[in-house]
Image (cartoon, rainbow, N blue to C red):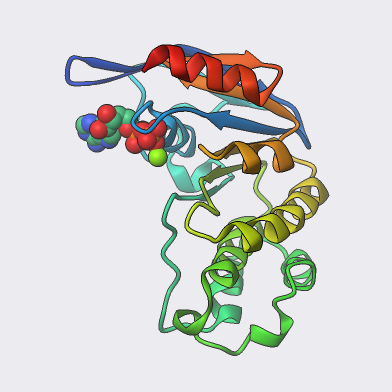
Amino acid sequence: MLRIENLKKFFGKNVILNKVNLKVNPSEIKVIMGLNGSGKSTFLKIIAGLIQPDEGQIFINDKDITKLDPEDRNIGYVPQHPALFPHLTVKENIYYSLKNKRGSKKLADQLVKMLDLEPYLEKKTDILSGGYKSRVSLARALVSQPEVILLDEPLSDLDLAIKEKLLEKFKEVLKFLNIPVIYVTHDPVEAQIIGDTFSVLIKGKIKEINSIEEAHQLMRKDL
Ligand SMILES: Nc1ncnc2c1ncn2[C@@H]1O[C@H](COP(=O)(O)OP(=O)(O)O)[C@@H](O)[C@H]1O
Ligand SMILES: [Mg+2]
């Protein structure tokens, strides 16, 4: 389980996260919505270890990881605009972390199959469509067998038709891993398809909600 307690983060005088608490269970896909600039990406970067919080703790299965370096956290992270290595092939991009003795070849092979990437393995990533780049980014974040996965608007650059098809695939893959998932999006359609549970980041707080409509109401109030 992923557990976040009393997380606080200032940028200068602005409080971006104000004592945020959150729990995500294994195989739960927790969607976090929120207006632009509400702090969603900052929140994920803190969990991934790329930004230090001012206060608070992060636990994975009751182990405090707050002070660990990103590479020691065992967290998969797909940033908002993931950069693949353009000079490497799809295969090299995905199997890269196996070279560093982390992850499992068997899992990598399974991910390639589930994401229909087999025909593209020898292609350079810069010739891929946006949708296929997203598939590679997801596979790459998962081959190291992370204990938690964080996705920051991974499909926001795609057309709606492609997005709907890909969301089902992403959901299948994420469920297969059976780990806690945080999925950040500002798109209600996306949230509805992929999410098990929903929350909104608003005025530095994360509020659990029961429906997408509730998210809209809260965000409208905040405008
Ligand atoms: N490194 C930084 N230094 C100062 N302010 C930042 C930094 N990163 C983000 N911010 C500010 O913090 C707020 C939250 O940003 P961000 O987490 O990117 O929001 P979101 O992902 O929800 O759009 C914004 O007002 C942004 O300008
Ligand atoms: Mg963001």
Q: The C terminus is located in which quarter?
A: top left
Instruction: Tell me if residue 29 comes above or below residue 119 in the rendering.
Output: above
The residue lying at 80 percent from left, 46 percent from top is 175
- The picture quadrant where one finds residue 161 is bottom right
Residue furthest left as drawn: 12
Residue furthest bottom as drawn: 122
- Percent across and percent down for residue 118 are 73, 82
The residue lying at 54 percent from left, 69 percent from top is 133
Q: The N terminus is located in which quarter?
A: top right
- Percent across and percent down for residue 52 are 35, 29
The residue lying at 57 percent from left, 21 percent from top is 215
- Residue 5, visible in the rendered structure: no
**In this image, 42 relative to 210: left or right?**
left
- Percent across and percent down for residue 45 are 42, 37
The residue lying at 69 percent from left, 55 percent from top is 164
Camera-side residue of 60 and 141? 141
Q: Quadrant of ligand 1?
A: top left
- Percent across and percent down for residue 101 are 60, 65
Camera-side residue of 219 and 10? 219
